[in-house]
Each structure stands twice: as C-alpha cells, then as structure tokens.
Image (spheres, rainbow, N blue to C red):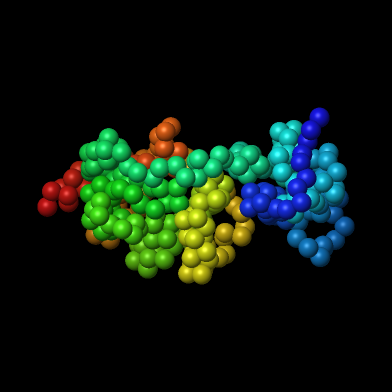
C-alpha cells in the first residue's frame, strides 16, 4: 500500500497541512484523549509521538508530515489523524482539502460576474445580497446591502474593489455597531482560513493576508491558530443605529462553473423587509 511521498522540499500546501496538524495537536491535552497526565509540560498540547501512536503511524513520518516534508497521505492516514486529533466535521474537511490541493485552474478561475447573476442579485432588494470573489473582494452588491452594510454605491467602473473581511476588521464604525464584534471577527477569520485552503497559490489572497497581519490586531491573534469554520446557513439578528433591529436568514451559494465566486444572501424577515423597502423608496 502506498501511504505517502517524501519530497526534498516543502510546498505551500504541505507546509499549511503541517501547520494545521501542529495547531490541532497543541490545543489538546493528555486528558482530552484519555492519556495519563504526569504533570505540567514544557510545551503545550500532545507530543508528536502520542499523536502518531493514536493514529497508528510512525513518529518519524508524522514529524515529517508536520514539517511539510511529506505529501499525498492516504485517506486511511487522514482518517486516523482526524480521529486522533478529535477534529470536527469542518476541520476534517479542511484536513482533506489541505492534503489534496486543488487544480491550478481553480486558482485562476474567472472572477467575472455574469449578466444573469448581476440581474439576480440586483433584483433581490429589499433583501441584502452581494457577490464575493475568492479572496472575499466584493464584486457586486445590491441597494439593500448598500443600505444595511453602509457600502458605497455599486459601479462596474470601480477599480479597487472593497474587501468584505478587510472592511469588517478595520472599519471603526462597523466595530462600534457590533457589540459582539470580537466573536464575529473570530468566526469570519476561521471561515476565511477555510477558504484559503482552496486558493493557497492565489497571489491576491496572499497579499491580503500579509496586509491584514500588519493592520489588524484580531487577524494577527487568530490567523496563526489555524481555526476553521465552514460557512453554513444560519439565522442572524442585530441592531443598526439608523435602521433598528433587523432579522435575516443567511445563505451562501456557489455556481458550479464559477467555484471562486460566492453569492451571499440575507433574506429579511417580513418586518425587516418592510422597513428596508420603505427606506429604499425614500
């Protein structure tokens, strides 16, 4: 059985896989996995040999995996590591994505918004809707999104696209209007980390990471933790000082032929929809 390939160098993908494994190992304690505890340790988390033993693989090979010197681990090995490291379903999916880098064509997939998608998003008013590129650059948004999220008026001629994550992390008014901003920032960074697994060769993505490491304290704190969260449909409620309390059902959609593009829709409750409709007609 072929379990892995050992490479002389390390690629960004294998390094990211190794960093993720290390972060997940260091967050666990012996008590978490049923191992005996013999007092405080010099370094946080489990030892590499403990993870290797629980995953039924060699310690030297697991060490090479963490150090980015191994690629293409088998599904059997990935499953064993997911169990040993107590990964959630989202983290397990992330592990597989890191271990199976996407084709280069996906990285360079078109970020153009089709006419049909444009008309669909604009027609969703008074429900806020926007289209995000692979690195969360905002490619399109409707009038309701402009109102709810204080966005500039959309124009196709805009050269520099606003970025959804940068705006949330660095805009002072956004922070003031969100009492639970810290928790939301942590979730958004974890979702951004999950998306990054698909686009590690994307220069725009990497430039944004470098920028946010310089400009955002929250990003500097949470990005190295390698926490991931898969975007799911959910209920959202918050209060906007100029609009009042708002309530939405949040969904994210992707087109099969444009995997680098996300359509984000906030479907308003009846009361919220009526209020937004009145404001948009003023």
Using the rendered image of the protein, determine whether residue 203 is visible from the camera's viewpoint.
yes
Does 265 appear above or below 256?
Answer: below
Residue 239 or residue 224, whichever sits in front: 224
Residue 63 picture location, percent across and down? 80, 51
Relative image position of residue 14 (x, y in whole percent): 68, 49
Identify which residue is drawn at 85% across, 54% down.
37
Q: Where residue 137 appears, x then y in whole percent?
A: 39, 53
Q: How many marks?
A: 0
* Res. 273 image quadrant: top left
Q: Is residue 43 above or below residue 238?
A: below
- Is residue 151 left or right of 220 when viewed as pictured? left
Q: In the image shown, does 271 or 113 lie closer to the viewer?
A: 113
User: In the shown orientation, is residue 200 left or right of residue 39?
Assistant: left
Residue 208 percent across, percent down from the top left: 48, 60
The residue that appears at 48% across and 69% down in the rendered structure is 215
Residue drawn where x is 35% and y is 44% of the image = 112
Q: Residue furthest top?
A: 1
Which image quarter is the N terminus in? top right
Q: Residue furthest left?
A: 282
Residue 30 visible from this viewpoint: no
Residue at (13, 48) in percent of width and height: 281
Front residue of this view, candidates 60 and 46: 60
Give 162 or 222, whichever is nearer the viewer.
Answer: 162
């Amino acid at each position: 059985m072929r379990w892995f390939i050992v490479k002389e160098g390390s690629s960004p993908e294998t390094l990211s896989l190794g960093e993720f494994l290390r972060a997940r190992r260091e967050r666990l304690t012996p008590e978490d996995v049923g191992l005996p505890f013999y007092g405080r340790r010099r370094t946080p988390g489990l030892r590499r040999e403990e993870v290797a033993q629980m995953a039924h693989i060699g310690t030297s090979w697991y060490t090479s995996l963490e150090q980015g010197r191994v690629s293409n681990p088998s599904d059997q090995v990935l499953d064993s590591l997911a169990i040993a490291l107590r990964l959630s379903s989202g983290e397990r999916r992330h592990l597989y994505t890191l271990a199976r880098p996407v084709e280069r064509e996906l990285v360079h997939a078109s970020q153009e918004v089709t006419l049909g998608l444009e008309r669909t998003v604009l027609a969703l008013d008074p429900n806020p809707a926007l289209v995000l590129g692979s690195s969360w650059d905002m490619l399109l948004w409707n009038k309701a999104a402009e109102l709810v999220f204080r966005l500039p008026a959309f124009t196709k001629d805009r050269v520099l696209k606003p970025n959804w994550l940068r705006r949330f992390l660095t805009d002072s008014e956004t922070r003031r209007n969100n009492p639970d901003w810290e928790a939301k920032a942590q979730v958004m960074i974890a979702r951004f980390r999950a998306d990054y697994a698909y686009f590690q060769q994307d220069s725009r993505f990497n430039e944004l990471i470098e920028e946010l490491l310089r400009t955002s304290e929250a990003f500097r704190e949470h990005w190295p933790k390698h926490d991931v969260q898969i975007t799911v449909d959910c209920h959202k409620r918050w209060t906007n000082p100029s609009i009042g309390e708002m309530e939405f059902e949040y969904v994210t959609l992707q087109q099969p032929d444009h995997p680098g593009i996300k359509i984000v829709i906030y479907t308003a409750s009846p009361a919220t929809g009526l209020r937004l409709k009145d404001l948009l007609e003023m």
